[in-house]
Image (cartoon, helix red, strand yellow):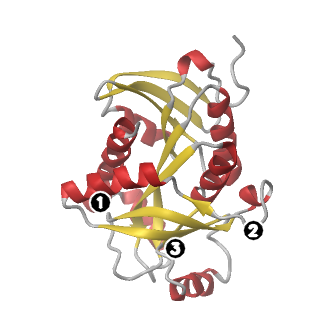
Amino acid sequence: MIAQPHIGLTPSQVSERVVLCGEPARVNRIAALLENPRLLAENREFRSMSGTFQGVPITVMSTGIGAPSAIIALEELRQCGARQFVRVGSAGALQPHIQLGELILVEGAVRDDGGSASHAPGSYPALADRHLSNAMEAFLQREGAAFHPGLVRSHDSFYRDDELQICEYWHRLGVLGADMETAALLTIGRIRGLRVGAVLNNVVRYGTDVQAGVSDYVNADQALMNGELLAIRCALYALSDCP
C-alpha cells in the first residue's frame, strides 16, 4: 500500500483518533502517556507515533508551524482513516487574567490565516466539535483545573511591526489567545466532516513582548510544563471517551 506523500503513513498505521501538535519533540512527550508507544514515521515536520490509551488506539503527529502544514497533516491522516482530532498546542494570551500554564479550551477561532482562506470564504465559521469540547471540559472540571473556554485567533506571523496593536484590537473583542494552526484545522475538519477540537497551553502573558515571551517558553518553567501535561491528558481522555 502506497504511503501518503508528506506524512509517510498508510491506513494500516493510523488510528481513527489522533492527537495533533506543532512541535515534533512534543510527540514524544504525548506518546510517553500511551501504552506501547512506537515510532511510525518522520519526514520534514511530520513525526508520528502510535499506541493505546485506556485500551483505545491513538495516533500522535506533529504538524510544524502554521496552517499549510497543519492542513496537509489533517488531509493525509483523513485519507488514512482518521476521523477525530484534538490539537494540543500553545498560545499567547490576549487577556490579562489568563496565567502561564493555564489552558484555553477552544470553542471557535478567528480565521486570520491564509490556509483556511484557500478552502472557504472568511464568513465560514471555524467551530470546534462539541462532543470533543464537552469531553475535554468535563475532564478539566474533574481535575479542578484553571481553564478558559472561548475564542482564539489564528494568524500567520507574530513578528509584524504592528503586532502590539493587533493584539490590543482582538483583546478588546474578547478573544482569549492567539496561535497559528487552530482555525485551519477547525475549518478544514468541518468541511471534511471530521471531529476536531483544540486545547491550548498559554505560554505568553498578555502584554509581554513577543520575543521575551517566546524566550520564556523555550526556558520551559514548571508552570508551562504542567500546563502542557494537563493539555495532553485532557486530549487523550476526550479522545478515549468520545463515541
Which residue is found at the position 40% from the left and 75% from the top?
205
Q: What element carries label 2?
A: loop
Tag of residue 210: 3
Q: Name the residue under label 1.
A: 221
Q: Are marks 2 and 1 in contact (CB under 8 Å)?
A: no
| 10 Å crowding of disc 3: few (<14), some (14-19), many (20+) | some
Above or below 155: residue 242: above
Which residue is found at the position 67% from the left and 32% from the top?
76
Residue type at mark 3: give it.
Val
Above or below 104: residue 38: above
Q: Is mark 3 on a helix, strand or loop?
A: helix
Q: Residues under labels 3 and 1: Cα distance?
A: 17 Å
Residue type at mark 2: give it.
Gly
Q: Residues under labels 2 and 1: Cα distance?
A: 37 Å
| 10 Å crowding of disc 2: few (<14), some (14-19), many (20+) | some
Depth check: give the residue in front, 40 or 239.
239
Q: Do the residues labelled 3 and 2 touch (CB within 8 Å)?
A: no
Q: Mark 2 points at which residue?
A: 122
Q: Is mark 1 on a helix, strand or loop?
A: loop
**In the rendered structure, which disc, 3 or 1, sits on the residue that comes first in sequence?**
3
**Number of marks drawn:** 3
Q: Disc 3 vs disc 2: which is toward the camera?
A: 2
Q: Residues under labels 3 and 2: Cα distance?
A: 27 Å
- The outermost residue toward the top is 1
